[in-house]
Amino acid sequence: MTIAVVLKQKGQDVISVGPDTAVAEIAHTITSRRIGAVVVREPSGRLVGIVSERDVVSAIAHHGASALDMQARDLMTRDVQTVTPETTVDAAMEIMDSGYFRHLPVCSRDGVLTGIVSIRDLVKHKIMLHQHDVESLKAYVSGMA
């Protein structure tokens, strides 16, 4: 299965902020939307970074309350790992595991941001596949009896 299948199921909405967005606003967005990260985009729409809840907590730990006055550009991860819709779910999970992060922006081959997946999205998808396999096996075995 591919990331395209996961995005079709979960949707392609991407919550994003600009590089000059205050960390306090990012924290509010993450909390109110119940998400773990926001992508950072230039006004042109080009992906330039990602800020996770972990980045916000780390900034507060290092800078105290003044971290809330910082901007996305001050703490975002700039070298963002991305996947394409054609990437397999297993490959995406391996990328997340080896990079110790939980969110992957999805970009088309020409670099246009088309979605974002979390480890939760991928695990949920794999569980659904396994449940389908179990139900198919049960039906097969029941049909033999």
Image (cartoon, grey):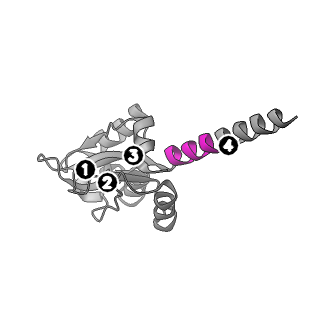
Labels 2, 3: front one: 3
Q: Secondary structure at mark 3?
A: helix
Q: Position of residue 20 (x, y in %)?
A: 18, 48
Labels 3, 1: front one: 3
Can you say which quadrant of the picture contains the C terminus?
top right
Residue drawn at the location 39% of the way across and 31% of the way down: 32
Q: Earlier in the sequence, mark 3 or mark 4?
A: 3
Q: Which mark is residue 40?
A: 1
Picture layout, residue 99 above or below residue 87: below
Q: Amino acid at mark 1?
A: Val
Looking at the image, do the residues carrying marks 2 and 3 touch, with CB atoms under 8 Å apart?
Answer: no
Count residues near mark 2 (Cα–Cα under 10 Å), then give few for <14, some for 14-19, many for 20+. Answer: many
Q: Earlier in the sequence, mark 2 or mark 4?
A: 2
Q: Earlier in the sequence, mark 3 or mark 1?
A: 3
Q: Amino acid at mark 4?
A: Asp
User: Label 4 belongs to which residue?
Assistant: 133
Magenta span of residues: 120-130
Q: Earlier in the sequence, mark 2 or mark 3?
A: 3
Q: Is residue 142 within the magenta segment?
A: no
Q: Secondary structure at mark 2?
A: strand
Q: Position of residue 103 (x, y in %)?
A: 42, 52
Taking depth in this image into account, of 19 and 64 the one nearest to the observer is 19
User: Label 3 belongs to which residue?
Assistant: 4
Q: Secondary structure at mark 4?
A: helix
Residue drawn at the location 46% of the way across and 48% of the way down: 118
Q: Amino acid at mark 2?
A: Ile
